[in-house]
Structure formats: C-alpha cells, structure tokens
Image (cartoon, grey):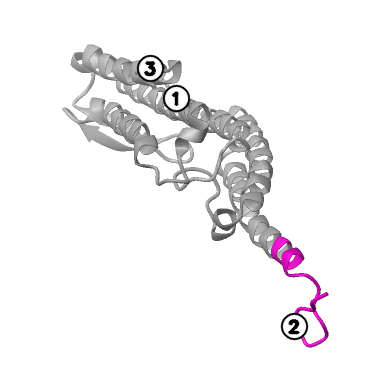
Amino acid sequence: MRISRAHVLSLGFVIAAFAMAIVFYGRLPESIPTHWNAEGVVDGHTPKPWGPFVLPLVMAAVYLVLVAVPRISPKGFSVARFQGVFEGIQATLVAFLFLLNALVLLAGLGVPVPVARVVPAATGLVLVVLGNYMGKFTKNFFCGIRTPWTLASDEVWLRTHRLGGRLFVLAGVIVLVSGLLGGGPVPVLVAVTVAAMTPVVYSYFLYRRLEGFKRGPTDGAGTHRSS
C-alpha cells in the first residue's frame, strides 16, 4: 500500500514529539506548564511523568483516528473521494499540535514563550488552510459543515462549503493578524463565531429556496398549482 507524503509528515511529527519529550525529560521540572489563560499567563500544570507526554499522546490519538476515518466511512459518504484533501487536513492538525507541544516543552525549560501571540497566529493559519480545502469536501459525516440541509442536498452542500471556505480564510487572516498584534481573545471569538455560524444559517435558507423552486408556484390557498 502506498503511503502518502501527508501520512509520512504526520507520523514524523508524532515521532518527533515523543523524541523531544524523551530528550528533554531530565531537564524538565517536576510540574510542566500545560495551560495558559487568555493573557498568556500559565494557570495550569501537569506533573511528571505525564506532563511531557500529554500532547505527544494526543497527537498519536488524533493521527490514528484520522487514519481510521476513511476506513469506517459509510457507503455514499466516503472520505476517500477527497482523500488527498483529508490527508492535508490531517497533517495540518498534527503540525498544529506539534507546535503546541514545542511551546509546552520550551516553557517547561524556562524559555519565555509568547503563547498569547503564537497560538492565535497558528490557529489563524490552520483556519486559512481549512478554508482553502473546504470547497473540495464531498458529502461525508466526519468533516465539513454537516447540517441537515447540506446533508439533504448536494447543491446546498457545495454552495455552503464554497461560502464557508471563503469565510474561514477571512477569519483565519483576522485571527492571524490579531494574534501577531496581541489583539486578545475578542477578535478571535468574533471571527470564528461568524465564520462558523453564517454557513449554517445560509444552508437553511438556501435549502428552503431550492426546495421552493422544485415545488413550483402556489395558489392563494398555499397549494401547489399544476400546469
């Protein structure tokens, strides 16, 4: 079986994360910073031995789940129809988690880490990547804008994901710039909420409009006229 470059890249990130945790384990304190508040101040720690390996384990779990998804997709909703895109998303998510793992280890080693800027900026990049991929999603049960209306209509699915892709790219740029400038959590929350909710509402009204066209005009009593 051919192994794609995206799989090799994802697996490489997972292996590298475990390797980093092992290499730096002896230099890390007994309690590792693993959570920061919105201002970038550490407000949560995880003790050894789990602290250095929490994110590598999460990365491994995410990788395995995403490898399994194409194999358990129901007939007619197969992720395999956009396999390359799905693997690109997989590599993007694993790379994001690898960055978080590096930040955790650096913080544990006493290196000043600008988490409040780096994490939102990286999140923005992830949103841009997802937005660029979104228009290539075919109907499935695992990723995308899965509303009752997109799942009921191929046309609604296609149009909604085209709109969602543009909005996610725009939101990603806003989140990226806000992170780099230290804009705080408000721009991030607003941009992500608008990008996530607008396609949901759009899919409902688009479905109603397309269904109305299919049914044809109605008479004054609300019943459909036949020609």
Among numbered discs 1 and 3, the one appearing first in the sequence: 3
According to the picture, the residue beneath numbered tag 2 turns out to be 223
Place of residue 38 in the rendered image (x, y in percent of width and height, measured from the top left): 48, 41
Q: Would you identify the image quadrant in which residue 212 lies? A: bottom right
**Residue 60 falls left or right of residue 90:** left
Measuring 36% from the left and 18% from the top, which residue is drawn there?
13
Image quarter (top left, top right, bottom left or bottom right) of the C terminus: bottom right
**Residue 31 falls left or right of residue 92:** left
Q: Determine if residue 42 is in view.
A: no
Place of residue 19 in the rendered image (x, y in percent of width and height, measured from the top left): 26, 14
The residue range painted magenta reads 210-227
At label 2, the amino acid type is: Thr
Q: Vertically, is 177 above or below 201?
A: above
- Which residue is nearer to you in this view: 176 or 134? 134
Mark 1: which secondary structure? Answer: helix
Mark nearest the camera among 1 and 3 is 3
Q: Would you identify the image quadrant in which residue 113 lies? A: top left
Image quarter (top left, top right, bottom left or bottom right) of the N terminus: top left
Place of residue 88 in the rendered image (x, y in percent of width and height, measured from the top left): 49, 26
Q: Is residue 10 magenta?
A: no
- Which residue is nearer to you in this view: 118 or 127? 127
According to the picture, the residue beneath numbered tag 3 turns out to be 3
Disc 1 to disc 3, C-alpha distance: 13 Å
Mark 3: which secondary structure? Answer: loop
How dense is the environment of label 2, judged by Cα within 10 Å: few (below 14), some, or many (20 and up)? few
Q: Vertically, is 74 above or below 17?
A: below
Q: Would you identify the image quadrant in which residue 209 lies? A: bottom right
| The disc label shown at residue 91, or none | 1
| The disc label shown at residue 54, or none | none
Residue, far top: 23
Q: Vertically, is 60 above or below 78?
A: above
